[in-house]
Structure formats: C-alpha cells, structure tokens
Amino acid sequence: MKRLTVNTFALQSLRKRKKKYAALIAGIILAMVFSSGTLFLLASLFSGIDDLTAQAFGNENAVFYGLTEETLADGRARFHIESTAQGEVLGYLSTGDEDRGVSVAKLTPEAQALTYTVVTEGAYPQNAGEIAVEEDALIRMGLHARPGDTLTLTLQVQNGAGYLPVTVQKSYLLTGILKDRRVNVEYMRASKSLFPAAFVSDKETVEPGGKPLPVTYAVFSRGSGPTNSSYQFYYDFCKAHEEINDAYESVFISRDSYSLSGIGKLQQSGVLASVLAAVFTVVSCVGIVNAFSSDLQDRKKQIGMLRALGATKIQIVRIFGREAFLIALCSAPFSLLLSYFGTRLAVRLIGNGLRFLLFRET
C-alpha cells in the first residue's frame, strides 16, 4: 500500500478538485497580470523619464570651462563633486552669422558616457575631419545637411578663454545628428556661446597657433535638502574660487524635465500608474486571500476528518501550504511572462520616445 505523505496528499487533493483549482488559477493569473503589469509599466515609466531627462540634459549637473586640476581637486575634497569627465573646446563654428554659431568640442570616451551623448541619425565621429552636430544647431545655422554631407564652416580658433583674431575655413564630413541638448540648457539661461553643440572625434586637434579651452563636466552630490543640495554645493564651490566666473564661464544644469515636450506627460502618467499599481496590488492580494479562505471554508469537513485520523495542526498546515505552493508554481511564471510582454506592447503603443526600461540604462 502506497504511503500517504504531506506531498502525496496535497497532489491527490489537487487532482480531485482540479476544476475548482483551474478556476482559482485563472483568477490568480488575471489578478497577477493586472498588478504586476501595472508595476512593470510604472517602473518603465520612471526609468523612461530618467532616460529621456538624461538625453535632454546629460548626466552632469555642472559644466566648467578652464578649470585647473588643482581647483577640481578642491571641489572633490570639499564641495561634493562625485565624478568628472573632460573635454576640450576647439573653437566656434558658424556660417558667417556669429550669433547663430555653435562651439565645437572633442570629448574623451568618459565624457561621452557622462554627458549621455545620443546620436539620432548616423554615427558619432571616429576620425579627424568628421563631425556630429545637434539638430537644433544645424537648423539655427540654416543648414539642411544629413549624415554623409560635407559642411564648410567658418571656424574661430579657440585660444584659451578667447579666440585667435583670424578665422579659418574648415570642411567636415557630417557623420551624425545628435539629440538636442544645448537648446534645453539655453532655456535655463545658461551659457549660450561656450556650451558645445558640435563634436569632433578625439583625434582632432586645435588649429595651429590656438589653445584648446578645457571643459569639465561635473556631477555634484544631490544633497538632502534645499540648504544642502547639488546647486548649493556648486554655488559654494564657485564662491570659493572666484576665478571660475572671473576668467571663464560655468553653468549649473537644472533638470527641469517637466517643461520638456513629452516628459511632463509621462510624469503625469507615472502618478496615475502609481495609484493604479497600488489599487491593483491591494485588490489582487485581497482577491487571492479570499479565494484561498473560501476554499478552506469549503473543506472544513475534510480538515475535521484528518484531525480525527490523527493528523496534527502542523501537518494540515503543511498539506494546504503544499497545495498553495503548487498553485503558485502553476500561475506565477505564466502571469509574469504575460504581464512582461503585455507591458512591452503597451509601452510601444504609448510611444512619445518612451522605451521599455525596468531599470535605467547606464
């Protein structure tokens, strides 16, 4: 005679009540799909907002021009600069109208990663003589070029904080169109002349006679309050080193992402998704608990018979625990997969540049 154990009893109970349990599993799957799907959507919304904000502003929150290594070291030591990356401004490009030109710079790979440079069309320049320009900068200069075109521009050669008195005609192969960033920083009344919107490869050098202007992208600690914030650290750092604003420019980048097209709507959607996630999660948990409680009420006689046959309370709890585990094993993976791919589809339909990102990409 086959010996009855907690596991075999649980399995036999599931077989005898398979129709009822099938309906219970279907209800659990439905509840989990709604709740986990909403949570997936919520995570994707907020990760997507972070991603779109980084595309619009970069990951840095301050930009310094002409900063010395000694001053930078003091910023790390006393003013909560967490990380930095370097580049060089090589000059100022225009088609003749200086007010509509842009600074051109080269970045180290670390600076490209920190500034989160996004190429929307083509590729980032890899060789000398190549250039990538922000879409807004091309429009401002009256250029309708696409990747593969040659740009002939007037270059004011950088000479430290200023420019050489003689301009140079330069031809570049346009390899890529970049996501607009300078226009967003201009919106904050930041530096308009120095903030680069055109980039060449790290193989490019300044024109003979010129001197590149170092540009430092910095990340200040966020702090814990209005009087201990990244802006306050930036302000204190600039105040302690007056040469930062006396000789060169610097800018603090405030990520006012709500004002940018699409991101404000996503933030509103995120709030709504948060409420829905909380409601669906609570309703799902209550529904699942009620379903199991109802099942236990229906099986009071069976529990009484088991007690009469000598089963202990712990054994009965284990039997029903095994049944619950097997039901969860049947429903949870399928529910998560369904909600995962369902959320991916929903995010694609939402559009607005939103991507399915459970976690922020680094």
Image (tube, helix red, strand yellow):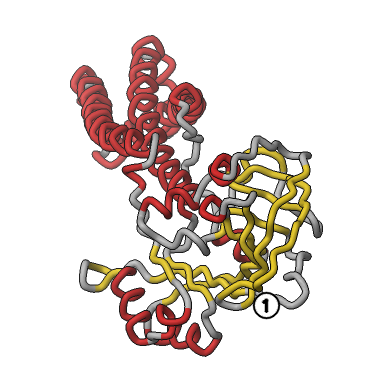
Which residue shows up at 44% across the image and 71% down it? Answer: 250
183 vs 350: above or below? below
**Is residue 4 in view from this perspective?**
no
Residue 297's x, y, as percent?
Answer: 18, 21
- Residue 24: image x %, image y %? 34, 18
- Image coords of residue 40 (percent x, y): 41, 35
Nearer to the camera, 320 or 84: 84
Q: In which image quadrant can residue 242 be found?
A: bottom left
Mark yes or no: residue 170 visible. Answer: yes
Q: Which residue type carries mark 1?
A: Lys
Residue identifier under label 1: 211
Outermost residue on the top side: it is 19
Q: Secondary structure at mark 1?
A: loop
Instruction: State which quarter of the image contains the C terminus.
Output: bottom right
In the image: residue 123, left or right of residue 87: right
Crowd class of label 1 (few under 14; some 14 to 19; many from 20; radius 10 Å): many
Vertical placement of residue 183 versus 300, above or below: below
Which residue is painted at 52% across and 45% down in the image?
180
Q: Residue at x 39, y 29 (%)?
A: 37
Say which of 344 and 112 sits in front.
112
Residue at x 37%, y 14% (from the top left corner): 17
